[in-house]
Amino acid sequence: MLIQLSELFTCEGKKKEYTVETSLRTLEFGGETYRILEAPPFVLEIESLTRRKFAMRGSAAVTVEGHCARCLEPVSFVCNLCFDREFAIGEGNGQEEDSEEEPYLDGSCLDADRLVCNELLLSLPMRVLCREDCRGICNRCGTNLNFGTCTCDTRSLDPRMSVIQEIFNEFKEV
Ligand SMILES: [Zn+2]
Ligand SMILES: [Zn+2]
C-alpha cells in the first residue's frame, strides 16, 4: 500500500488516518525465512508538520513464525510494532546531502509494506527459541531432546563442546 504524502496538504488539520493492510507474507532475515501468520489491518495516522516533515502514529501486532535456533521446531510469536515518529522526505532531484532517507520512503510516497517490514526486522528477537530451556536436538541422531532421550554419548551433545572434545582427544592421542 502506497500513501501519497502530498495529499495531506489539502486535508483538514493536515492529517489523515489510513487503514493499512499489509501484503507482506514472508520476511527474510539472517538466513531464515519468517512467515507472517497474522497481520491485521491497523490505523496509521500521518500528519504533515511542514512541507517536508511529517509525524506518524500507529501500532500493530504481527504474528510471525520462525524456527527455534536449538531444536528447529516452528515457533510463532507476536511482534508489537510502534510507528510513532517523525520523518522527513527529501527534496527529490539534486541535493542529496542529508539523504538519510528512510527505506520506506520513495520521493513523496510512503510504502506501508516496507514500513511494516522495516519495523518487523528491527523487532525480531536475536535468537528465536521455542522456550528458554529448550534442550535442542541431538547432533548425532537428531532426536528432539525436548520430547525424548537418545543413547548417544551425552558428553558431546552441544556441538561447540564436541569440537572442543575432539581437539582434546587429538591431543591425547599424540
Ligand atoms: Zn526449541
Ligand atoms: Zn542422539
Image (spheres, helix red, strand yellow):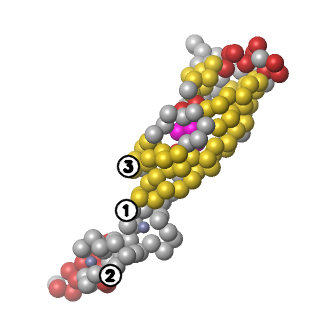
Residue 130: x percent and y percent?
47, 65
State whether label 1 is within 8 Å of ligand 1.
yes
Labels 3 and 2: the sequence-earlier one: 3
Q: Main secondary structure of the magenta part?
A: helix
Looking at the rendered structure, the number of numbered marks drawn on it comes to 3
Q: Residue at x 68, y 16 (%)?
A: 6
Q: Which mark is residue 31?
A: 3
Residue at 79%, 21% (x, y): give it.
14
Q: Which residue position holds label 2?
A: 149
User: Bounds of the magenta span?
Assistant: 115-119
Frontmost of labels 3 and 2 is 2
Instruction: Report the amino acid beneath label 2.
Output: Thr
**Whether residue 79 is visible:** yes
Mark 3 surroundings: few (<14), some (14-19) or many (≥20) residues within 10 A: few
> Residue 121: which disc?
none
Work out whether residue 44 or residue 167 is closer to the camera in this orientation and state it.
44
Residue 58 percent across, percent down from the top left: 70, 38
Nearest to the observer: residue 122 or residue 19: 19
Q: Is residue 138 above or below residue 46?
A: below
Gap between marks 1 and 2, in whole Å? 17 Å
Left or right: residue 57 versus residue 95 is right
Quadrant of the rendered image holding ligand 1: bottom left
Q: Amino acid at mark 3?
A: Gly
Residue at which label 1 appears: 72
Sequence order check, earlier mark of 1 and 2: 1
Q: Is 17 situated left or right of 34 in this image? A: right
* Disc 3 to disc 2, C-alpha distance: 29 Å
Q: Find out whether the residues at labels 1 and 3 contact each other: C-beta distance under 8 Å.
A: no
Kind of residue at disc 1: Leu
